[in-house]
């Protein structure tokens, strides 16, 4: 795999899905960390090992826009407010399945998968 290709066109979540041919929660975590790196959210530790994801609206004026699945992830997380406890992310399971499928679709559109490997099984 050409590392240049992954850095230029693929998000960390898509790269993870490409490497092991499956999109899972690790890839969603990679997307969250990348969104934090790009300024769309912050990750804050409160107390001990109690983490929160906090939406940052300051990137709204940025030229950097989240990919479709990333925006869906942000909407699922912050639809009800500006912060969410990481332990409560399990409450958006159906949305996470949709987001995983969106990542597969992105890989298909890049012609990296002929079809969704999850549907091949």
Image: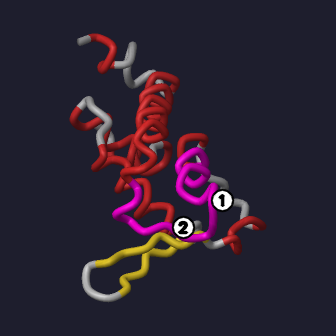
Report whether 40 appears left or right of 31. Answer: right
Q: The C terminus lies in which quarter of the figure? A: top left
Residue at numbered disc 2? 38
Q: How is the image coloured?
A: secondary structure
The percent position of residue 115, horizontal first and vertical second, equals: 39, 14
The percent position of residue 87, horizontal first and vertical second, equals: 34, 63
Question: Residues in magenta?
Answer: 71-89
Q: Residue at x 21, y 35 (%)?
A: 20
Answer with the quarter of the image where residue 86 lies.
bottom left
Examine the residues drawn in magenta and state their main secondary structure: helix
Pointer 2 with pointer 1, Cβ within 8 A: yes
Q: Circle 1 sits in a helix, a strand or a loop, which is it?
A: loop
Q: Residue at x 50, y 32 (%)?
A: 102
Q: Report the disc number at residue 64.
A: 1
The mark nearer the N terminus, 2 or 1, is 2
Q: Residue at x 59, y 60 (%)?
A: 78
Answer with the quarter of the image where residue 19 lies.
top left
2 or 67, which lies in front? 67
Q: Report the disc number at residue 86.
A: none
Q: Dot 2: within a 10 Å radius of its alpha carbon, few (fewer than 14), some, or many (20 or more) residues? A: some
Q: The N terminus lies in which quarter of the figure? A: top left
Report whether 69 appears left or right of 25. Answer: right
Q: Residue at x 43, y 41 (%)?
A: 96
Q: Dot 1: within a 10 Å radius of its alpha carbon, few (fewer than 14), some, or many (20 or more) residues? A: few
Q: Circle 2 sits in a helix, a strand or a loop, which is it?
A: loop
Q: Residue furthest top?
A: 120
């Amino acid at each position: 795999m050409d590392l240049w290709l992954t850095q230029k066109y693929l998000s960390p979540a898509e790269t993870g899905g490409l490497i092991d041919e499956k999109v899972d929660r690790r890839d969603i975590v990679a997307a969250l960390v990348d969104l934090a790196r790009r300024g769309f959210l912050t990750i804050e530790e409160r107390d001990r090992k109690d983490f929160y994801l906090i939406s940052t609206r300051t990137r709204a004026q940025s030229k950097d826009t989240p990919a479709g699945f990333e925006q869906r992830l942000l909407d699922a997380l912050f639809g009800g407010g500006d912060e969410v406890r990481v332990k409560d992310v399990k409450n958006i399971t159906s949305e996470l399945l949709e987001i995983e499928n969106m990542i597969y679709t992105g890989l298909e559109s890049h012609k990296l998968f002929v079809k969704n490997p999850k549907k091949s099984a």
